[in-house]
Image: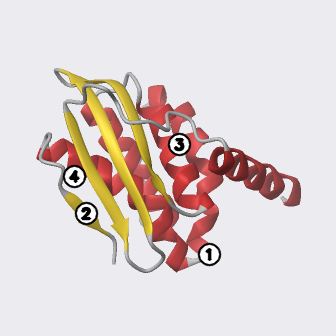
Amino acid sequence: MTDLRELYQEIILDHGRHPRNFHALEHPTHLAKGYNPLCGDRVTVYLALDGDRIVDVSFDGRGCAISTAAASLMTEVLKGKTVAEARALFARFRAEVTGGETVELPEALSEDAERLEPLTGVKAFPVRVKCATLPWHAFEAALKGGLEGDTVKTE
């Protein structure tokens, strides 16, 4: 178990120091900002949708290693997914980090859910759950708000 925890820490640190998809999309179809007033994390999530499919997703902002790693991992797993698949992954992730009821996923999404597992250790630190879910809440706000640039706060 210690080896797995160390591996998860390494993944979080790697994504925190070298985030993937860390840039503003040139022509997003949707975007939203997320802000965590407890620790100052800020993230903007950019989406390019083609119908119901996420063809590109990125983020920028500043925050702790957990929020940055969460946004980086989120963008990696969401590319190419449908909006319904993305929402299912978020529901599963949120349940795992909050200790909620397990959300079943189709087999096709199980590998993506496993890629998010390094962040599930935050459930032991309730204040850090907001860091890990902030990019996901911004993603949801982007889906609802289009290019309005809504800001969602985690409190």
Q: Measured along the vertical axis of the image, is residue 24 above or below residue 133? A: above
Q: Nearer the viewer, mark 1 or mark 3?
A: 3
- Indicate the amino acid at tag 1: Ala
Q: Residue 119, can we see it? A: yes
> Disc 4 designates what residue?
141
Q: CA distance from mark 4 to mark 3?
A: 17 Å
Q: What x and y, as percent, mark residue 58?
A: 41, 36
Q: Extreme right residue here?
A: 3
- Indicate the amino acid at tag 2: Val
**Which comes before the other along the chain, label 4 or label 1?**
1
Residue under the point 56% across and 35% down: 20
- Kindly check if marks 4 and 2 are in contact, taking CB atoms under 8 A apart as contact: yes
> Disc 2 designates what residue?
152
Q: Quadrant of residue 155?
A: bottom left
Q: Measured along the vertical axis of the image, is residue 138 above or below residue 87? A: below
* Drawn side of residue 11 relative to residue 20, left or right: right
**Which comes before the other along the chain, label 4 or label 3?**
3
Q: Residue 99, can we see it? A: no
Give the structural element (helix, strand or loop) at label 3: helix
Q: Quadrant of residue 50?
A: top left
- Indicate the amino acid at tag 3: Ser
Give the structural element (helix, strand or loop) at label 2: strand
**Label of residue 124 in the image:** 1
* Drawn side of residue 119 relative to residue 44, left or right: right
**Label of residue 72 in the image:** 3
Total residue callouts: 4
Q: CA distance from mark 2 to mark 3?
A: 18 Å
Residue under the point 26% across and 33% down: 83
**Which comes before the other along the chain, label 2 or label 1?**
1
Q: CA distance from mark 2 to mark 1?
A: 24 Å
Q: CA distance from mark 4 to mark 1?
A: 26 Å
